[in-house]
Image (cartoon, rainbow, N blue to C red):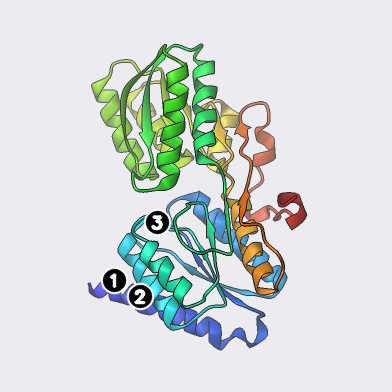
Amino acid sequence: MRDFMTVALACFLTLAAAHAKAADAKFTIAVFTKNTTNPAYAAFRIAADQVARSAGARIVHYVPRKPDDVEEQIEMIEQVLKYRPDAVVFIPVDDVAMIDSVKKLNAAKIPVVLASNPLPGDFVSYVGADDFEIGYRQARYLFDRLGGKGRIVIIEGTPAAPTNRERVRGYRRALAEFPGIEVLGSGAGNYQQPDAKRLMAKFIGDFPAIDAVLSANDGMAIGALEALGEAGRTSVVIGINGILPAVKLIETGALLASVDFNMFKIGCTATRAALRHLEGEPLPEKIMLPAEIIDRTNYRAWLVPVEQRSCPEWSEVVK
């Protein structure tokens, strides 16, 4: 409890300090992401900072110390309510548990841009991608490469995350279209590389032959590759996110492919949406970024480190 209260106090002091210095900033925006362990969320934060710098705004980041911790995120919302930012860019750690917190932000008339994970509430805009379509396209791509036959394992993300539920729903649709694909096992890797590595080690112990691994994100795909390497086994592995370490593995052939669920572009767009709202500019209710398969035919476009990327112009994203 003491550590938890320390985190909450640190968040409050950070936002208070940001407001104290806000004389030289147009707006202060609180940005909520899920963890410090997934490079996709690091890319989101880098994007938010880039947009804010160019606009003369200030960003304060709120990230649970324990990955995807509901109680920490709830407490961080309480601190934001005490020292009101001009807007919130919000990725919920859980689409059910965070509903009441969103209601409080709505009641306080703090504008919220929702990103990545949909949930009920009043938002000035939602920025994300179609996770059902992402999962479906990823699975179909893998099954096509297997020639429509093979034994696979599935490494799912965090069970409570809507991104995971939709991706798994996409997997089910693809599996229904490929009766020659046999699912040996499926389990939660919680979108974390160490968790996925442990799960993959279990699958390796349980099944003497695994043709492929369908992973709901790149970090878990990398964890699966680590477990396979340590066991002296090989399987075809595919992920989602298009993070740089995964793209480098695509370059070497260690990873079959990834799907570009581009958290950098989502971060750019969500932060721009918040600023446009504060400036009184019109916003669409929903902004969906297209996904693209990344493989050996096109991977070079994703080799640029996130820190060196430039946010797309608003007109490139919102037609």
Q: Tag 1 or tag 3, which sits nearer the N-term?
A: 1
The reply to whether dot 1 and dot 2 touch (C-beta < 8 Å) is yes
Mark 2 Cα-neighbour bin, 10 Å: few <14, some 14–19, many ≥20: many
Q: Determine the residue positioned at 65% across, 69% down.
A: 277
| Residue receiving disc 1 | 4
The residue shown at (41%, 73%) is 104
> For this view, does 129 lie left or right of residue 173?
right
Estimate the x, y position of residue 182 in percent, counting from the top left.
36, 16
Of tags 3 and 1, the one toward the viewer is 3
| Cα–Cα gap, marks 1 and 2 | 6 Å
Q: Which residue is drawn at 51% across and 52% down?
A: 116
Q: Name the residue carrying label 2.
A: 8
Circle number at residue 319: none
- The percent position of residue 280, horizontal first and vertical second, equals 70, 73
Work out how far the residue at label 3 is from the one at label 1, CA to CA, in angstroms. 17 Å
Residue lying at 67% horizontally and 61% vertically, measured from the top left? 283
Q: Where is residue 208 in the image (x, y as percent from the top left)?
A: 28, 16
Residue at image mark 3: 93
Q: How far is mark 3 from mark 2, CA to CA?
A: 17 Å
Q: Is residue 265 above or below residue 142?
A: below
Image position of 317 with respect to 64: above or below: above
Q: Which amino acid does label 1 sit on?
A: Phe
